[in-house]
């Protein structure tokens, strides 16, 4: 059984944990939600890096053998620094531009992400590398993170907020939409309900889970056989644990 640390600016990283547990069902997880400082999207880079250092120190002190930065904004802002300063392996989020470019039939891909992610060097490099032959329409998911952090992932309020950011992508002809923030998959049903079932949503979390196993194999980190009884998760947060546990119960 491996001890895997996962952290995010809030509860959104649980969407990544959900995919990781599908392929690693037996491990000992510690999940940290920095909800008191959520969202990270508009925070200064140095603030995000400082928070990531503090969270990393805590996860290592609790015995984490590998850490998943389950936050697009934190990955963009801090993962290079973390890899330089710590010997533990970090798995970060990747902008899912490449698969979106492969799937689109209209040649137009929508990207929903935070402002921090859309301005990041990693995202801009991926867009330049993989999107030269397609059109990318970007929009910040205004209010999406706040919805999820309140545990509102369906209903009229969610539909109203999601519609405002989604419509510009649909009006531009996007048939494939990248979910560029780990909070956003919790709103997938709302997005599909508004956009229609023909719209393809790209969530990078399954690919991140696969990559985690690859790195664990490379590093010789032992993980357990399939036995659900051995699964453990320690949920921690700088904010409200009630909300975190509410979202966890919906996984």
Image: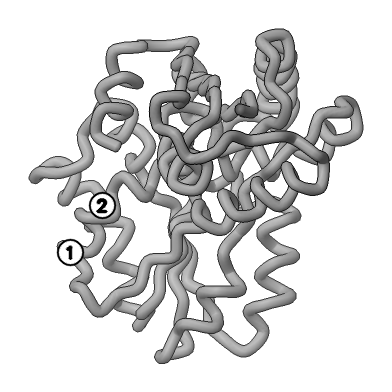
User: Which numbered marker is on residue 27?
Assistant: none
Relative to 161, residue 198 above or below: below
**Residue 245 image-quadrant placement:** top left
Q: Position of residue 55 (x, y in %)?
A: 66, 17
Q: Residues within 10 Å of mark 1 (few under 14, many from 20)?
A: some
Q: Which one is in front, 17 or 182?
A: 17
Q: Position of residue 207 (x, y in %)?
A: 57, 58
Question: Which residue corresponds to the image point at 38% horizontal and 78% vertical from the top-left?
Answer: 174
Model colouring:
one colour
Q: Which residue is mark 2?
A: 162
Q: Position of residue 238 (x, y in %)?
A: 49, 10
Q: Position of residue 36 (x, y in %)?
A: 47, 14
Contact (Cβ within 8 Å) of mark 2 with mark 1: yes
Is 149 on the left-hand or right-hand side of 49? left
Instruction: Describe the element under mark 1 as helix, strand or loop.
Output: helix
Circle nearer the N terminus (2, 1) = 2
């Amino acid at each position: 059984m491996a001890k895997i640390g996962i952290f995010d600016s809030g509860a959104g990283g649980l969407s990544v944990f959900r995919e990781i547990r599908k392929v690693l069902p037996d491990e000992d997880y510690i999940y940290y939600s920095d909800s008191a400082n959520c969202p990270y999207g508009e925070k200064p880079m140095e603030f995000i890096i400082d928070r990531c250092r503090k969270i990393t120190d805590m996860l290592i002190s609790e015995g984490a053998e590998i850490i998943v930065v389950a936050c697009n904004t934190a990955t963009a802002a801090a993962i290079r620094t973390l890899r330089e300063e710590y010997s533990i392996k970090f798995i970060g989020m990747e902008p899912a531009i490449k698969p979106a470019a492969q799937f689109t039939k209209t040649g137009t891909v929508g990207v929903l992400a935070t402002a921090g992610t859309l301005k990041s060097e990693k995202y801009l490099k991926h867009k330049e590398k993989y999107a030269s032959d397609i059109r990318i329409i970007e929009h910040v998911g205004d209010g999406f993170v706040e919805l999820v952090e309140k545990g509102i992932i369906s209903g009229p309020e969610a539909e109203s907020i999601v519609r405002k950011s989604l419509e510009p992508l649909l009006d531009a002809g996007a048939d494939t939409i990248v979910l560029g923030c780990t909070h956003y998959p919790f709103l997938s049903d709302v997005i599909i309900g508004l956009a229609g079932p023909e719209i393809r949503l790209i969530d990078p979390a399954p690919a991140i889970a696969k990559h985690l196993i690859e790195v664990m194999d490379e590093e010789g980190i032992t993980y357990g056989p399939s036995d659900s009884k051995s699964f453990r998760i320690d949920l921690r947060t700088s904010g409200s644990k009630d909300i975190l546990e509410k979202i966890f119960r919906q996984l």
